[in-house]
Amino acid sequence: KKASDEEDGLLSLASSQRMNTDARRSIFCIVMGSSDCNDAFEKLVRQGMLKPKAERDVIRVIIHCCGEEKAFNPFYAYLAMRVCEFQQKSKFTLMLTFWDAFKQLESFSVRKIANLAKLLAHLIGSANKCLTIGVLKRVEFSPSDMPESVVVFLSTFMSVLFESGEVEHIRKIFAHGTSNSSIPVKHHVDSDVEDGNDKVQTTKKEDLSDLRESLSVFLLQYLKSSPKNVEGSAFRSNLLAAIETCDEANTDS
């Protein structure tokens, strides 16, 4: 009876959170009803939720739930990483879902913006490289008239990255796309297109020179004045490393 009541409660919550398909409601109940990341991952695998195309809903539900929490919960970052390790196509879905979120930032609460920024910092800063700094190329950078929502998102994202990372790791993150290794780049028209309509091209490198220039300006304009930017702190070392890497990479390209 208790388990049944709990399931009914989760289904009711799923409906209130606009989980409008059976698949999304099932995923929501698994994610929210699991004891930890491993438990959630194993249940998703057993239910066949991580098969190609089916995993798209899993990623979208994870990001939705993360955004709705009262405070950021690393559980969602670890679960997203496990999903991406198991199903590589999930990385593309992850990128598209963040691109959709970037378009809606101004309609989000500060809490939701902060949660998603922290999630992205964990995913980009992780060793398994679920996402790269290139995901930010869909953010609207306009230094003279940047919406407060974008400033909050990027400031939170950078702060988490700079407070937790090592200098060399930060340099690698911001130098992404400058190596000569082949990187597959998917081009798409809309986030709802099916895999069969996606065109995949392989290029020697992803050109992120415009993004790095925008990031350098943002860091100088907003992060240098941060109260966290104090002498001897990891934040300052990583901030300077990020600015230098952006400027050096663009000078060399």
Image (tube, rainbow, N blue to C red):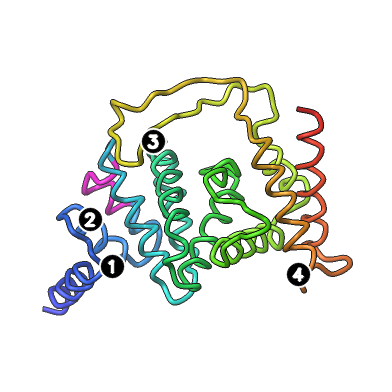
Query: Quarter of the image containing the N terminus?
Result: bottom left
Region rendered in magenta: 42-50
Q: Earlier in the sequence, mark 2 or mark 3?
A: 2
Q: CA distance from mark 4 to mark 2?
A: 40 Å
Query: Quarter of the image containing the C terminus?
Result: top right
Residue corresponding to mark 2: 24
Measuring 42% from the left and 46% from the top, which residue is drawn there? 94
The amino acid sitting under disc 3 is Lys
Are the residues at dot 1 and dot 2 in contact (C-beta closer than 8 Å)?
A: no
Q: Does 105 sit left or right of 157 as displayed? A: left
Measuring 47% from the left and 61% from the top, which residue is drawn there? 105
Q: CA distance from mark 4 to mark 3?
A: 37 Å
Tag nearer the camera, 1 or 2: 2
Q: Earlier in the sequence, mark 4 or mark 1?
A: 1
SS for dot 1: helix
Q: 46 or 68, which is in the foreground?
A: 68
Q: CA distance from mark 1 to mark 2?
A: 14 Å
Are the residues at dot 3 and dot 1 in contact (C-beta closer than 8 Å)?
A: no
**Above or below, 138 relative to 66:** above
Q: Does 123 sit left or right of 104 as displayed? A: right
Q: Does 215 sit left or right of 168 as displayed? A: left
Tag nearer the camera, 4 or 3: 4
The amino acid sitting under disc 1 is Gly
